[in-house]
Image (cartoon, helix red, strand yellow):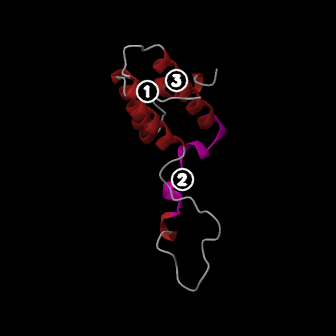
């Protein structure tokens, strides 16, 4: 049910180009059996590469060098709205399912979830 909105957006060509590129990368890696890379691509789209402020960001009178990396351009897609969070969760489940049904793939290319 959660992935249905993603399919509708793809059919009507309303999916953001950046999101489409990330999902295509995930699908390509799954088809190749590169599940570690697919998982990395999922994490990249889910939480992004943004700097995460941990604790206090401004302590002294000087600005920190990493402070400018914390901006709106680095905000992850999944944080935008509930709909995207739900269909990205479904994409992750599809990655896990695809990995489970592929016994031919080398174990070093799989993500182990305990």
Q: CA distance from mark 1 to mark 2?
A: 28 Å
Report x, y in % for residue 98: 47, 19
Asked if residue 40 is among those painted magenta in the image, a careful observer would answer no
Crowdedness near tag 2: few (<14), some (14–19) or many (≥20) residues, C-alpha within 10 Å = some
Question: Which label belongs to residue 110?
Answer: 1
Q: Position of residue 46 (x, y in %)?
A: 54, 41
Q: Which residue is mark 2?
A: 75
Report x, y in % for residue 99. Answer: 46, 20
Where is the C terminus found, in terms of image quarters? top right
Disc 1 to disc 3, C-alpha distance: 9 Å
Question: Which callout, 3 or 2, points to the residue nearer the camera?
Answer: 3
Residue 76 in the magenta stretch? The answer is: yes
54 displayed left or right of 73: right
* Residue at point 49%, 25% (across, down): 95
The residue labelled by disc 3 is 96
Q: What range is drawn magenta here?
A: 70-83
Q: Quadrant of residue 107?
A: top left
Q: Nearer the viewer, mark 1 or mark 3?
A: 1
The quadrant in which the N terminus is found is: top right
In the image, is residue 22 above or below residue 28? below
If you read the primary sequence from the N terminus, does the residue marked by circle 1 or circle 3 appear first? 3
Q: Residue at x 47, y 13 (%)?
A: 101
């Amino acid at each position: 049910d959660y992935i249905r909105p993603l399919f509708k957006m793809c059919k009507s060509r309303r999916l953001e180009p950046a999101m489409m590129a990330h999902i295509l990368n995930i699908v390509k890696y799954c088809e190749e059996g590169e599940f570690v890379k697919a998982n990395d691509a999922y994490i990249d789209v889910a939480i992004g590469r943004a700097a995460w402020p941990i604790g206090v960001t401004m302590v002294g009178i000087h600005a920190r060098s990493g402070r400018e990396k914390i901006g709106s351009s680095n905000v992850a897609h999944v944080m935008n709205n509930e709909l995207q969070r739900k269909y990205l969760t479904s994409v992750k489940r599809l990655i896990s399912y695809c990995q489970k049904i592929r016994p031919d793939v080398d174990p070093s290319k799989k993500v182990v979830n305990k």
